[in-house]
Image (cartoon, rainbow, N blue to C red):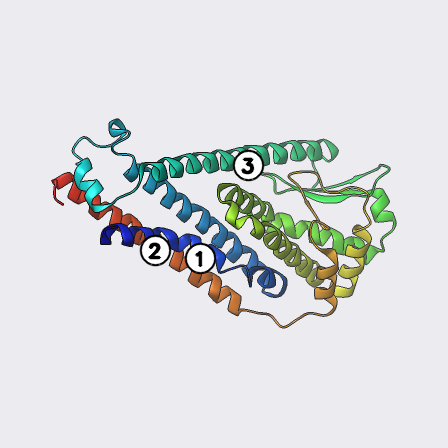
Amino acid sequence: MTASTLLYVSLGLAPFLVSALRRRWSTGFAHHGPPGAAALALTTYALTLALTQGIVLCLTAYLGTIELFPVVHPSDWSASVLGANLRIPAWCAVGCAIVAAALLARAGARIVLSLSAVRTTNAASRRLAPSADLAVVAGASRVAFAAPAWFSRRRGRIVVSRELLAVMTVPERKALIAHERSHLRHAHHLYALVIRVAAAANPLVGDLVAPVDHACERWADRDAAAAVGDPVIVAHALGRAALTDRRAPEGALGATHSDVVSRVRDLLEPQPTDRRALIRCALLVAVSWAMTLALVAHGHAIVELAEQGLS
C-alpha cells in the first residue's frame, strides 16, 4: 500500500470512526441537555455523518472504477498514474458504488413517504377545520396531535378529540394545546424528517432518531410549562394524554410520541443541564467535515497528477 493510499484510507475512515464515538453521550444529551440545542445539534450531527460518509463512498467508487468504466471518467485521466498513486481494488470500488446507490435510494424513498404522509394528514386536518388552527373532533377514541402544513402557507393545525378534553381540567387543556403549538411554531416536523432521511442514508445514525424525537418533545414540554406557568400541570396533561387510544398518524406530531415517564420526571425533578455534550457534538461535526474535505483535497491532488500523466 502506497503512502498516498494509506492517507486516503485514514481520511476516509475518519467519519465512520466519529460515528462510533457518540453512543455514550447522545441519549444523555437528549434527556438532560437544553432540548432545543440537543435537537438541533444531534440532527446536524446525523446529517453530517450521512453526507460525509456518502461522499467517501461516492468518491471511492468513482476513483476506483476508472479501469472498469473509463467512459464515465475524463479522457485525459491516466489510469496507470491514478492506480500507481491510489490503489483501490475494483471489488472495493464497485462495492462502495452499490452501497452508495442503495443508501441514496433509501433516503429518497424516505423523503417521498414522509412528504406523502404529511400531505395526507394535513389534508385530513383541513377537512376537520377549514379555517381554524384547532380542530376538536368527536369520536370513540382519545387522540391529540399537531399536523404540520408543508404544502401551504398555514402553519398547520392541532387536532384534539372531545373525549380527551373531557378528562382534562382547563389548565391541562391549555398545556396540551400549548405543547402542540410548540411543535408547529418550532417546525419540529423538519427535525423529524431530516433525522429519518439521515438514518435512511446512513444506518449507522439510526439510533439517533429516538433521541432527537425525545429532545423535540422535551422542547414542547418546556414551552407548555412556560405557557401555563406550572410544570406540574403539564405533567398531569401528559399523563392523561398517555392514556390515549390511538397514536398520532404518520406525518403528525403527538404529545405522547416519546418516553412520557422520562419527560414527566424531567418536568417534576429537573436535572442539571449538561452542556458539555453540545461541545462534543460540535467538535465531532467539525472533525467529520475537516477529514472529509481533506479527503476530497487529497483525491483532487491525485487526479491532478493523473491529468498531467505524472507518477
- Residues at marks 2 and 1 touching, judged by CB atoms closer than 8 Å: yes
The numbered mark at residue 18 is 1
Identified at 59% across, 36% down, the residue is 114
Residue depicted at x 41% and y 47%: 53
Q: Position of residue 237 (x, y in %)?
A: 79, 56
Q: Mark 3 touching mark 1, by CB under 8 A? A: no
Point out the image quarter for the C terminus: top left
Residue at the far front in the pictured view: 1
Ranked by sequence position, the earlier of labels 3 and 1 is 1
Separation of residues labelled 2 and 3 (CA atoms): 28 Å
Residue type at mark 3 is Arg
Relative to 136, say whether 69 is above or below: above
Q: Please state which of residues 15 and 88 is positioned toward the viewer in this rendering.
A: 88
The residue labelled by disc 3 is: 110
Q: Amino acid at mark 1?
A: Val
Q: Determine crowd level at label 2: few under 14, some 14-19, many 20+ residues with C-alpha closer than 10 A.
A: some
Q: Nearer the viewer, residue 224 or 214?
A: 214
Residue 130 seen from this side: no
The quarter of the picture where residue 136 lies is top right
Crowd band around label 1 with a 10 angstrom C-alpha radius: few (<14), some (14–19), many (20+): some
Is residue 247 at all visible to an observer of this figure? yes
Q: Which residue is mark 2?
A: 291
Residue 71 drawn at (x, y percent)? 25, 26
